[in-house]
Amino acid sequence: MTDQFNTWQAIQGEVLRRIHARDWPPGHPLPNEVDLAAEFGCARATVNRALRALAEDGILERRRKAGTRVALHPVSRATLDIPIIRQEIEAQGKTHDYTLLSRVTGDHPICGKALHITALHRADGAPFALEDRWISLATVPQATSQPFATHSANEWLLAHVPYTHGDITFSAQPAKASEAEHLKTTPGAPLFITDRTTWDHDRPVTVVRLFYAPGYSIRTTIGERP
Amino acid sequence: MTDQFNTWQAIQGEVLRRIHARDWPPGHPLPNEVDLAAEFGCARATVNRALRALAEDGILERRRKAGTRVALHPVSRATLDIPIIRQEIEAQGKTHDYTLLSRVTGDHPICGKALHITALHRADGAPFALEDRWISLATVPQATSQPFATHSANEWLLAHVPYTHGDITFSAQPAKASEAEHLKTTPGAPLFITDRTTWDHDRPVTVVRLFYAPGYSIRTTIGERP
DNA sequence: GAGTGGTCTAGACCACTGT
DNA sequence: CAGTGGTCTAGACCACTCC
């Protein structure tokens, strides 16, 4: 019982300090929770809280019976916040503008019979992102009665249609002629692309591809310690 | 006390069910923890655990005194695992190959006097990513004695130099002539780019830009429910 | 000021898994 | 089998913040 560490943040800080000081190098096993609690002069639950948070950050690896170790391959684990485009633009102090380009029904390999929508988002009048979206009519029949003329389908979906999970892919691809035209750039220009699919349990909700205008970037932090 | 929900996962599931069922639509306030614990027939700590996890996922918003609400703008919050390039390639069942292209010292706006390294990563012989890295010699003087001829600087840094935080930016940019040559593509081809800066407290450790060969994408999931 | 979430405690039982 | 982390409980005090 060398010192007193009352809060889980203090314990987390002390563990990080020992890792940084190489008292506990990568791969090194930590004492078990009971021993650490005794050393820190606190309850085991408090130690557990601190170590669990570090494990969620990818800094520690924990397994029952095997114990806790400093992660050998400290995979950087970053949390991405993916905002609504309107919020993203307004957060920059710019004015968001939305234009519906087309709205038809068709068939999509994942969504089945679906509403197909293309639209353009502008920031202070400049093209910001081109949206190419399919909304499954089997899952979201109410979409038929929505015009999506003045507001993004994304916002309507978030407010009215629940989803359980989804996946997102980021990539870079050359602009096709039509994409270049809407984004006021040249064909072949590098576009940052996000592809998103969302599901409500096993039913597809929507599939959307966003083409961002050249110069777009997405930023995140790792190991932020406030 | 309608039903019994013993585990925090069960409570989380029930809360999600009510959100999906629109019992609690976006913006709706939840009962406080004491009332929920009584309703679910469990301890308040268990309710707290469930709601805290949902708040970390961005599904709920919690403030002392103000209470808990269903998030009004359900920002998708995704966790990105950023692996070491060698692991990323080997996870695809391919062979990783590393070639040092250059190694000189110079000055960098953030790192100051720094070791400047460029290198190429290959997967099964095909160009995978071009690495352009600066290592601060003020923070990491030991780097001077490292050749980085056969192993990536990233792996050496992770194993030997601690960092406290960093930031990552993703973007799409056209290949310059030299980049195109190393990645065996054409100048102007869209490249997926990651820019990473890491710090040890207030001291810069390394600044690295990775140019990924065309076709690269990065994927993540949201709201995964195992 | 008062209500809410944030956290700590001490103890207990359970679930997983390495040996 | 036995050791470890995972979780729950009941109660308590604290910190923040809205009114």
Image (cartoon, coloured by chain):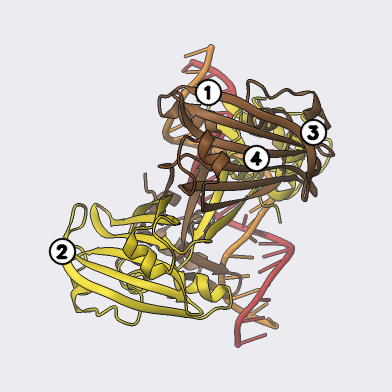
Chain colours: A yellow, B brown, C orange, D red
Distance from Cα at disc 4 to Cα at disc 3 = 24 Å
Task: Count neighbours of disc 4 (C-alpha within 10 A) and say few if under 14, some if 14 to 19, many if 20 or more.
Answer: some
Distance from Cα at disc 2 to Cα at disc 3 = 60 Å
The dot on residue A44 is 4
Mark found first going from the N terminus, 4 or 3: 3
Mark found first going from the N terminus, 4 or 2: 4
Residue at which label 2 appears: A106
Percent across and percent down for residue B153 are 67, 30
Horizontal side, residue A156 vs residue B207: left or right: left
Q: For this rendering, which residue is in front, B42 or A147? A: A147
Mark found first going from the N terminus, 2 or 3: 3
Up/down of B158 relative to A136, above or below: above
Q: Chain of mark 2?
A: A
Q: Secondary structure at mark 3?
A: loop
Mark 2 vs mark 1: give the one in front.
1
Specify the amino acid type for callout 2.
Answer: Gly
Residue at which label 1 appears: B97
For the question of whether residue B135 can be seen, the reply is: yes
Residues at marks 4 and 2 on the same chain? yes
Specify the amino acid type for callout 3.
Answer: Ala
Tell me whether the residue at label 2 lies in contact with that at label 1, contact meaning CB atoms closer than 8 angstroms: no
Task: Count neighbours of disc 1 (C-alpha within 10 A) and say few if under 14, some if 14 to 19, many if 20 or more.
Answer: some
Distance from Cα at disc 2 to Cα at disc 1 = 45 Å
The dot on residue A21 is 3
Percent across and percent down for residue B3 are 33, 58
Q: For this rendering, which residue is in front, A57 or A133? A: A133
